[in-house]
């Protein structure tokens, strides 16, 4: 603690070193709109500062000079129409001066027409799903920070809580339109460097757009309280050159085809258990906990659960179809047959559950096809 | 209470039944104020939990779900349990004394409005021990987090909010009826002290918007239990409808929590400047203007929900307009101080801090009004900093100033000035240490309502937590000062403040149990 305070004091005294620890203003960002919002922010800030200096200045001057202990006699005036009119009019004029550039910026922000790329962003408790419209590419983006770091068992890395497994990738200099919606509660997609913050609302679609000027990795977070892991669904956006973007897009398509093929191969128990452990950690542990103990009564334990130890088909149905009224998502819409099969196999053979059952991707695919 | 001649035959009942059965405005005022102080400490304890968890990055003390319960309950308790009842308590004590009335117009209703509150808050607090925990969807309880995805305790939350609403509406009716009907003969509306004016306007706001809150919690209840779909797109409803209805209540609510404080400050500043209030008529008009504008700005809380451009522009312009009447108030206070003969007793110190820090909160509010910039500020700690600046050194300092100012009249004893000054300076430093760094982390990108955060926010968060611990513990000193004053303070004079005017100072000290049983003669100044 003292080391930190010491660092803070140092940082206040010394010229800004490459220390990330002291960011205290809005980022300028990497788009024209983020730039104009930043300028707007600084303009209003300086106006506010000027008002504060004048108002507090008069007040402090008065406090210093017009005190009884200095023998000042109180005047008895109590009103003046002229000054009332003046100090009603001046703020009004200042407001008009602020309103004009704000209106121009806002109109620009609302112009989502003529986009080059459309990406549908869907909020889920507690991860983001990206779908490249017209490209057959879609994937989930989940927090990549290890649990050990969150629980203070390991040193935190510099991108703590701001890193994901699959960043959303976009090309620079292209107009990208985002379409926001949600699968459950309201989320908000926010990347400060892009100056985009938009609510993702279940049942409705919101729009926003950006055109990024510099390649780079831009990080953000969910900004609307969306339940218990609200703090743990970050956004990582990678802006690359157009050529790199095309290559990446092609790779994604191949990978998604490979995933389909994987469902058809024969999986061994060991492979399923290994994959299952990873899938469980990423998708299930937030509620049912890493040790399967759950958080009753909201999130039931899996360790010793009658469903997990019972018939395979009941277990599969719950995972695939979910129990939306209890907050259990329908994973059939989110994960591949392989991932679901692996997670179920893992759950049925972990902690106190020793059923020796193996659920194959083919079985899961079968169930999903029947639905 | 001393045995003043007037009180001999009509003194308070003995023992606990005095407090349960009382219809006396002074007793009920005291009940409200004590209740609010207790709630301040309960809500403050929750703030302690929040700040302790945020002291460092990583999860140390509490799990995220409990953290969310703490932020939710902290907000609900501070707003509905601490700030609002404190102002009703001040109104109970002061409105009859300031207008020369013997009591509130509806004394039994008055007793009822208070005694709803302990039950409402017992129910709300009991949710902490229920399976699934207390409400965890934020004090704004946005659907569908508060409907489909809510813990079972949401039902109790709805019931508790209904009870608080009934209490507030009844209290407001009482204030309005009292002010309209029980003014001393010859006292015109434009003779009313500003505290009374502010409360009158506040009471109208309460009557207008508390039923809207009742409506929105009822819709939540219906969605949870009776299969309606007000807020679910799946059944033809709209989650954003919730936000419109909620903020139509909650924006005027913001002014409900600050207008009475404006009134308090307008009483204290002239007293300690020994100079009449500058621009009385402008002050009244500005308050009415703020109250009116508060009804047409609500969607500035929703700039990111995807409203049409015209909607965004409308709410941006109306919100900016609020700066005009608010500015008028600040300018008038400063003009009152200008060329006065000021002294700086504890109430004055809190009042001056109110003007400065509330203005800072107002200026950050102006920044938030700018819709495009709000896309960056929205739901960050910048917003948290903004509303705490208007609520803590705003409303809460206003309440504390009022208590120091009128305590000599209420209790008959003078508080310890030296301890009062200590209380002020520690609070002033604590409050700024807590809330100022929040502007920085907010601008740098820290969202609100998170139990854990990225490393670049660590230093300012630690500073904020230290400030919060200082500010919180300092309020124990406040309790000590209050107890000491009531128990063993030096007897106060009838007019404890040289520059004070108004009917409340014309009654003996301490104020007898019954005052103005015959209406006072007004000597026109």
Image (spheres, rainbow, N blue to C red):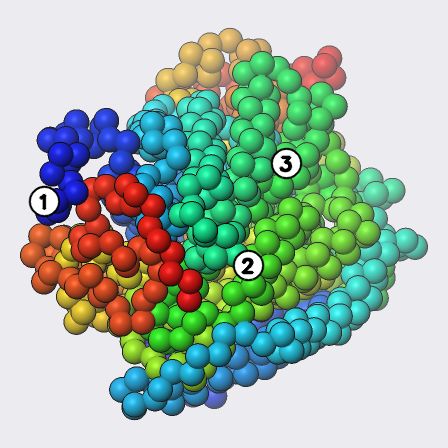
Quadrant the C terminus of chain B occupies: bottom left
Relative to A304, is A204 on the left or the right? right
Q: Residue at x 23, y 71 (%)?
A: B421
Q: Residue at x 30, y 43 (%)?
A: B518
Are callouts 3 and 2 both on one chain?
yes
Residue B350 spot, x, y in % from top left? 34, 67
Whether B92 is drawn above or below B489: the answer is above
Pointer 1 residue = B3
Element type where label 2 sits in the image: helix
Residue B388 location, quadrant: bottom left
> In this orientation, which residue lies closer to the viewer: A331 or A296?
A296
Residue B169 spot, x, y in % from top left? 47, 33
Pointer 3 residue = B245
Instruction: Give the chain letter at badge 3.
Output: B
- Tell me which label, 1 or 2, sits earlier in the chain: 1
- Tell me which label, 3 or 2, sits earlier in the chain: 3
> In this orientation, which residue lies closer to the viewer: B169 or A174?
B169
């Amino acid at each position: 603690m003292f080391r930190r305070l010491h660092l803070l004091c140092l940082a206040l005294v010394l010229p800004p070193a490459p220390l990330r620890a002291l960011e205290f203003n809005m980022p300028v960002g990497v788009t024209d709109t983020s730039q104009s919002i930043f300028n707007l922010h600084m303009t209003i800030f300086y106006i506010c500062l000027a008002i504060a200096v004048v108002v507090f200045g008069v007040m402090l001057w008065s406090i210093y000079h017009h005190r009884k202990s200095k023998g000042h006699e109180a005047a008895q005036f109590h009103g003046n129409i002229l000054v009332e009119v003046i100090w009603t009019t001046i703020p009004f004029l200042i407001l008009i001066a602020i309103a004009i550039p704000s209106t121009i910026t806002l109109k620009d922000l609302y112009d989502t027409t003529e986009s080059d790329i459309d990406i549908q962003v869907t909020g889920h408790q507690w991860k983001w799903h990206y779908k490249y419209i017209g490209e057959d590419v879609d994937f989930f983006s989940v927090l990549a920070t290890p649990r050990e770091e969150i629980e203070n068992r390991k040193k935190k890395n510099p991108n703590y809580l701001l890193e994901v497994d699959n960043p959303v990738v976009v090309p620079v200099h292209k107009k990208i339109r985002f379409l926001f919606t949600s699968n459950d509660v309201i989320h908000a997609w926010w990347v400060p460097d892009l100056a985009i913050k938009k609510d993702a609302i279940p049942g409705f679609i919101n729009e926003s757009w950006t055109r990024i000027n510099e390649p780079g990795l831009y990080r953000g977070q969910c900004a609307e309280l969306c339940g218990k892991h609200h703090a743990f669904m970050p956004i990582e956006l990678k802006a690359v050159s157009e050529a790199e973007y095309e290559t990446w897009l092609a790779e994604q398509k191949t990978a998604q085809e490979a995933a389909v093929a994987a469902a058809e191969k024969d999986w061994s128990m060991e492979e399923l258990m290994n994959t299952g452990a990873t899938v469980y950690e990423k998708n299930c542990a937030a509620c049912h906990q890493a040790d399967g103990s759950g958080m009753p009564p909201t999130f039931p334990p899996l360790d010793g659960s009658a469903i997990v130890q019972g018939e395979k088909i009941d277990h599969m149905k719950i995972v695939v179809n979910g129990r939306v009224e209890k907050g259990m998502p329908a994973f059939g819409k989110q994960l591949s047959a392989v991932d679901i099969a692996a997670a179920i196999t893992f759950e049925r053979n972990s902690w106190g559950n020793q059923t020796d059952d193996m659920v194959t991707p083919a079985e899961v695919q079968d169930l999903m096809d029947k639905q | 209470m001393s045995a003043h001649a007037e009180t001999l035959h009509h003194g308070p009942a003995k023992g606990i039944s005095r407090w349960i059965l009382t219809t006396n405005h002074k007793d009920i005022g005291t009940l409200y104020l004590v209740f609010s102080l207790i709630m301040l400490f309960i809500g403050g304890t929750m703030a302690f939990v929040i700040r302790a968890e945020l002291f460092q990055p990583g999860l140390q003390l509490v799990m995220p779900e409990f953290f969310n319960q703490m932020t939710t309950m902290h907000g609900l308790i501070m707003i509905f349990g601490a700030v609002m009842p404190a102002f009703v308590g001040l109104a109970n004590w002061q409105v009859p004394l300031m207008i020369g009335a013997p009591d509130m117009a509806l004394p039994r209703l008055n007793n009822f409005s208070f005694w709803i509150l302990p039950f409402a808050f017992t129910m709300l607090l009991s949710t902490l021990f229920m399976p699934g925990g207390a409400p965890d969807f934020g004090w704004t309880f946005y659907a569908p987090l508060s409907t489909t995805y809510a813990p079972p305790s949401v039902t109790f939350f709805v019931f508790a909010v209904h009870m608080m609403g009934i209490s507030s509406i009844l209290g407001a009716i009482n204030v309005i009826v009292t002010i309209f009907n029980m003014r001393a003969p010859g006292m015109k509306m434009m003779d009313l002290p500003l505290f009374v004016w502010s409360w009158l306007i506040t009471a109208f706001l309460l009557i207008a918007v508390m039923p809207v809150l009742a409506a929105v919690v009822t819709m939540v209840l219906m969605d949870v239990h009776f299969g309606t779909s007000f807020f679910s797109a799946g059944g033809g409803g709209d989650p954003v409808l919730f936000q419109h209805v909620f903020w139509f209540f909650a924006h005027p609510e913001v002014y409900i929590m600050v207008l009475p404080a404006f009134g308090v400050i307008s009483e204290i500043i002239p007293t300690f400047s020994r100079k009449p209030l500058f621009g009385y008529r402008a002050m009244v008009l500005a308050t009415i203007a703020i109250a009116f504008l508060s009804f047409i700005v609500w969607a500035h809380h929703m700039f990111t929900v995807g409203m049409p451009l015209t909607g965004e522009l409308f709410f941006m312009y109306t919100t900016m307009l609020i700066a005009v009447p608010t500015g008028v108030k600040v300018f008038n206070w400063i003009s009152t101080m200008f060329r006065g003969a000021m002294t700086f007793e504890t109430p004055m110190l809190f009042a001056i801090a109110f003007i400065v820090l509330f203005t800072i909160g107002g200026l950050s509010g102006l920044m938030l009004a700018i819709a495009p910039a709000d896309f960056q500020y929205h739901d960050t700690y910048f917003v948290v900093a903004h509303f705490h600046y208007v609520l803590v050194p705003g409303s809460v300092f206003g309440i504390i100033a009022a208590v120091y100012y009128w305590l000599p009249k209420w209790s008959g004893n003078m508080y310890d000035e030296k301890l009062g000054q200590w209380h002020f300076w520690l609070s002033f430093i604590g409050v700024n240490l807590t809330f100022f760094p929040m502007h920085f982390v907010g601008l740098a990108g820290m969202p609100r309502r998170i139990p854990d955060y990225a490393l670049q926010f660590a230093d300012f968060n630690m500073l904020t937590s230290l400030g919060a611990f200082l500010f919180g513990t300092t309020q124990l000193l406040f309790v000590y000062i209050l107890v000491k004053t009531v128990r063993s303070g030096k007897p106060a004079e009838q007019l404890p403040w040289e520059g004070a005017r108004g009917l409340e100072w014309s009654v003996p000290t301490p104020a007898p149990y019954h005052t103005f049983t015959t209406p006072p003669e007004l000597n026109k100044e």
